[in-house]
Image (spheres, helix red, strand yellow):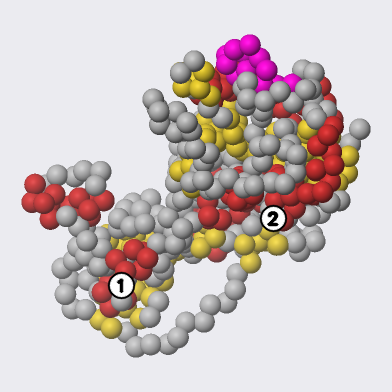
Amino acid sequence: MVKAIIGDVRKIYHLLEDNSIDCVITSPPYWQQRDYGIEGQIGQETSPEDYAKEIAYVFELLWPKLKTSATIFLNIGYKFQNEEFLLIPELVSFEMRKLGYLLKNKIIWYKPNAMPTPARNRLNNTYEAIFFFVKNVGKEVFYFNLAELYESSELFTSRLSTNIENLLSGKIEDNLTTRSKRVGIVTGVNKRFLKVLWNDGQEENIEFADEQKEATFRCENCYHKINYWDISLSYANYGNFLCPNCKTTNLPIPEFHNEVHEEREWLFSINLSTKSRLTNAKGSEKYKKAKLLTSSPAGRLAITGEKLVLKRKWIFPQPLIADYLKRHLKKSNITVGALEKILGYNYTAAHWLRKDFSHWGKGGSLPRPSDWKKLKEVLKLDSRYDRLLTDVVAVISTVRPHPKGKNIGDVWEIPTEPYEGEHFAVFPKKLVERCIKLGCPPGGTVLDPFAGSGTVGEVALKLNRKAILIEINPDYKKLILERCRNVEFIE
């Protein structure tokens, strides 16, 4: 769905609902670039400083309309004046910072087909800046789904390939399941499982995995499928869980699919000396000889070697468990202080009940598997979240690229696109698509307060997002209709 408003965003912003916008993608008129003949238009200010303040003023007005988790992709053009390269985007960035916006990235939009320049006393400017802002209200609050745009990495499969037999005699550490650290050695392997002999004499079979898995959920009321971001964004924006489909506050139920493991004979090792390499990853021997631990991945690998570590099998939002525990704590009439005493902790159990976000990170933490078993007895917990808290896997701890692919980086090579309509400066659809995939959740709402011909609306529809377009020039109403088809114009 695309909604559009013809008018000056500074005058009609009140038509937007508070806490309703997931993402802003926009390119305001550049300073002193073109006169569109509209009274009060942005871009005709007398100085770059005044222009920067005017752009920031728009986002000051929009602040309450943006969700806590909102992202902003702001494209501002550079300008040459009197032979000087003016840092107008940076001026805007400083003004935004004063308002409480946090700059996460300056993205370089490199245009391989940039217009040539007749200048012979400077280089041609072939890029523009896209500033990625979020609200400066705490860490890990905003939506940013890099998984949508990972670039595949062949290095991962070639350098980190390992047969499970290679894990025999590998060192394994457990800083998760109990309060005291355990160290062990892999004495046997069987397809997906390791037999581990711990330093306390205990022997245990543990599942081996390349990486942790993201848990999926269903709404208890309407059975709507719910993912990690649905839960995280709900707590970030509303402080509790709301089903994105039926809006009930019943906590979601995790889904687990039965995994069938092929039976295979165990392979054992009688060598109780641990080895330092488990994969084909290369370390730099010069750092090892010098005993120099540097920021170089190869250097760290040479010094520290490789090992296995125990991790939770499932990735899930911590505030969900905090909410669940708080509800049961309230039913039990046990105070937080009393719970701490029962479990033998000081200022630890309280963090399990925190679902807040702060500037230094999330205020909450998760109970260890051993603590979860005690909590079940004390608070009479059901079994719905048992596997989330107690399933563990052994993963290789090594210097390696992300298994899902490479971070796309902050230099984007995207050609400009021709447009037959009357609008002079059109966003490339590929650029808008990349921003939407990164910064707007599926089904979310994208706002473009300087909509022009409606590129953001067109791409949002294609990607199953909603869009709100604001455009000061009434002549562009026809262009928006042509590009977005079914548009609801708000008066």
The label on residue 464 is: none
Residue at figure coordinates x 33%, y 57% from the top left = 400
Residue at figure coordinates x 66%, y 41% from the top left = 426
Total numbered badges shown on the rendered structure: 2
Q: For the residue marked with disc 2, what is the amino acid?
A: Leu
The label on residue 463 is: 2
- Residue 445 located within the stretch drawn in magenta: no
What percent of the width, then of the height, locates residue 234?
Answer: 68, 45
What percent of the width, then of the height, locates residue 5?
Answer: 84, 34
Q: Name the residue at the left extreme.
A: 289
Q: Residue 480 versus residue 196: which sits nearer the camera? A: 480
Which quadrant, please, contains the C terminus? Answer: top right
Q: Name the residue at the top extreme.
A: 46
Residue at figure coordinates x 20%, y 50% from the top left = 299
Which residues are the magenta region? 41-52
**Residue 462, above or below 24:** below
**According to the image, label 1 marks what residue?**
162
Q: Residue 187 versus residue 245: which sits nearer the camera? A: 245
What percent of the width, then of the height, locates residue 478?
Answer: 85, 42
**Residue 278, above or below 426:** below
Q: For the residue marked with disc 1, what is the amino acid?
A: Thr
- Residue 42 located within the stretch drawn in magenta: yes
Q: Is residue 120 visible?
A: yes
